[in-house]
Image: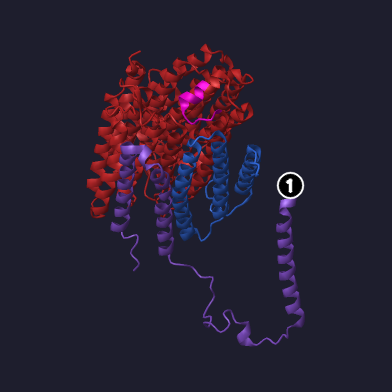
Chain colours: A red, B purple, C blue
Amino acid sequence: MNFDILGSLPLIVIWLALGVVGIIIQAFVRSDSTRLVYGYYIGTLVTTGLLAAATISNQGTAFGGMVTLGGWAAVFDLLFCGAGVMAMLAAQAYLGRFNSELDEFYTMLVSSVAGMMLMAHARNLVVLFVGIELMSISFYIMAGFFRSRDKSLESAMKYFLLGAFATGFLVYGMALLYGATGTLDYSVMLKVIAAGTARFPVLLALGAVLLTIGLSFKIAAFPFHQWAPDVYEGAPTVVTAFMSTAGKAAAFSAFLAVFGVIMPMVKVASMTPTLQLVLAVISAATMLIGNITAVAQTNVKRMLAYSSVAHAGYMLMGIVAGTTFGQSAVVYYAFAYTFMQLGAFIIVGLLEREDETSLMISDYSGLYRKHGVFAAMMAVFMFSLAGIPPFAGFFGKYMLFYAAIESGFTWLTIVAVASSVISVWFYLGLIVKMYFSEPNPETHEANAGLAGISLAVCTVAVILLGIMPRIITGMLGN
Amino acid sequence: MLGAYVPLIVMILIGVIFGVSNIVLAEWLGPRRSTRAKLSTYESGMEPVKSARERFTVKFYLVAMMFILFDIEIIFMYPWAVQFRELGMYGFTAMILFMVLLFAGYLYVVKKGALKWD
Amino acid sequence: MMTSIPLDYYLILSAFLFVTGIIGVITRRNAIIIFMSIELMLNAVNLSMVAFSAFFGDIAGQMFVFFIMAVAAAEAAVGLAIVLALFRRKKSVYVDEVNIMKW
C-alpha cells in the first residue's frame, strides 16, 4: 500500500492531537483552567498549518487512495488552520464576556477544522461524507453554544434540522452516483463518467443533481439559502465569523473536487452544458437574491449573512467556468473572502454587548470618533467586500469574472457586475454611517485584546492580497 | 410455483380462525363481572401510585446517548474481525488507532462524570 | 429455487422511503418527528447503497452504510441534545413556536 507519511502529516497530526491527546488533556485538566486547552489547540492549528504549508509541493495520495495530498488540498488546509487560529484568538475574550468560556468550544472548533481538511483532501465519497458531517456536527454544537440564549438555541436547531435534511440529499446523491458508476473513488468515477460507460445514465444525472443540492445547501446557494441569515444571526458572533468563512471555503473545496468528477458528463446525453447552465442560473440567482435582500437589513449580522450568500454566488462562477483558471480564481476568492468576512464579523463581535444589543446598523453611526481603528478596519473590509480596488475582493472578482467570460458566460458576468453595484449600496452605507453620522451616545468601550492580532492579520492580508495576488495563485508554482 | 405456498396459506388460515374464534367465544360465553381490583392497571400486582406519564431525569438521556455512540462503533469491528488475516498489519494498526480514539473519548466521558448516577 | 429480487424493487422502495421522509420533514412541526423523518431518509439511502453493493458484488457500498449509520448516531446525539436544551428554555419542541427570527 502506498503511504506517503510526510505528505499525510497534517492530517495525522490534527487527528492525533485532537482525538487522542486533546481529549485526554481535557479529561484530566480541571474544568476552570481553559488556558491550557486554549494554548494547546492554538498550537495544534499552527503546527498543522505549517505542516500543510510545507507539504504543498508534495503531491500524491495516501490511505489506499482515499485522500489526496499536497496541492490545492494543502493550500486549503492553510486557509482552514489560519481562519481557525484567528477565530480562536477572537473567541476567548468574546466567550469570556458572555460567561460561556468552556474548553469544549475549542475542541469543537478544531474538530470542525479537521472535518474541513478531510473535505479538501477527500478523493473518495466516504471521506467527503465523513468530513462534511464532522464539520457540520461541530458547527451545530458551536451555533448553540450560548445555551441560555433563545436565539442561539433556535439557530442551532434550525441549522441542525436543515443541515441534516441536506445531508440526506447529499448521501442519496452519493448512493445514486455509486449505483451508476459502481465506485466511490473520484478518479475511477471520473474515468467511468468520461468514457460514458456508466451503467444507469438516469441515475447518474439524478445523483449529480442531488449531490449539487446537498452541496448548495452547505454553501448557502440560492434555493437553499434561507437558513443562512437566521443561523448566522442567532449563533455567537465568533462562530458566525468562523462558519461563514472557513465553512464556506471548505464546501467550495469539496465542490471543486466533486465537480471535476461529475462535470464531464458530455457523453451521457450531453449533460455537461445542462449542468453548467443550471449551476450558472443558481449562481446568478444567489448573488442577486443575496445582495438585494442585504439592502433591506437593519441588523449588521444579518446584512453580512446575506452578503455571504451573495459571495457564494460569485464563487460559483469559477466552478461554472470549469477551467483551471476558474478553479484558481475560486481558491483565491476563498482566501480573500475569508479574510474580509472574518475580520468584519470579529469587529461586530467586539462591538456587540452582553445583552445582544449594539448589533443594528444604526448603532454604528459615528463609530470612528470612539473606535477609530475599528472603523478604519471595518471600512477596509467593506471596501474589499464591495470589490473596490486595490483590495483583495476586487482582484478576486476580476479573476472570477474573467474566468466566466472566458468560458462564454458573458450574461452571468453582466449579472454579477450588476449585483456588485447593488452591493456597493449597503457596504458603503455602513461606511457612511460610521464616518458621516452623528455619534451614537451609547457607544461603549470595546477592547480588542487578542482579537486585535486577528484583525491586524485580516486587514494586512486583505490589502496585501489585493496588491500581490500571486501570493495565493503562485503557491502551486505555476 | 405457487403450489409451494399452499401449506403456508393453510397455516395462516388456521391461525387466523383459531385466534378469532377464541376471542369471539370468550366474548360470547364468558360472564362479565368487573370489580375494582380487576379493572386496576396491574391486576393482583403493584398498586398504581401516580400517572406513568412523568418526566425522566436527564441522566437517562445522557446514558442512552453514550450507549448509542459507543454501541454503533462495534459495526466497524465486525468486518475487520471477519477479514482479520487478509487485512494484516495495516488493518490491525488502523483498528488499534480507532480503539485508542474511542478509549480517549470514553476516558473523557468518565472523567467528566457523565456516567455518575448521583 | 428462489429467484433473486431485481435491483429495481430495492431502488423503488428506497425512493419511496426517501420521499416519505421528505414529506415528513416538510409537513411536520415537531422537531423530534422531523428528525425521525430525516433518519428515514438516511435509511432509504442505506437501502439503495446495500442493494447496489450486492448488485455489483462490491463491498464499498456496504462500508459506506456503516459510516452513514455511525454518523447518524452522532447526529442523533447532538440533535437531541439541541432539542432538549431548547425544550428546557421554551417548554416546546414545535419549530413554529420557537421562531423569534424570521424563518
Instruction: Provide the residue designation for mark 1.
Output: B1
Q: Residue at x 34, y 21 (%)?
A: A59
Magenta region, mostly helix, strand or loop? helix
Residue A362 or residue A145, whichever sits in front: A145
Disc 1: which chain? B
Left/right placement of residue C85 relative to residue A350 reads: right
Residue A195 drawn at (x, y percent): 55, 18
Pinpoint residue A219: horizontal percent, then vertical percent: 49, 33
Query: Per the image, is A188 magenta?
Result: yes
Evaluate whether residue C35 shows in this view.
yes
Classify the position of the N terminus of chain C by image quarter. top right
Q: Is residue A119 above or below residue A276?
A: below
Residue A454 counted in the magenta span = no
Residue type at mark 1: give it: Met
Q: Which residues are magenta?
A: A181-191
Q: In this rendered view, identify the residue nearer to me: A332 or A12.
A: A12
Residue farthest along the right direction in this orientation: B28
Q: Which of the 4 quarters of the picture holds residue B107?
A: bottom left
Question: Which quarter of the rendering shows the C terminus of chain C?
Answer: top right
- How crowded pointer 1 is (Cα within 10 Å; few <14, some 14-19, many 20+) is rated as few
Residue A87 in view: no
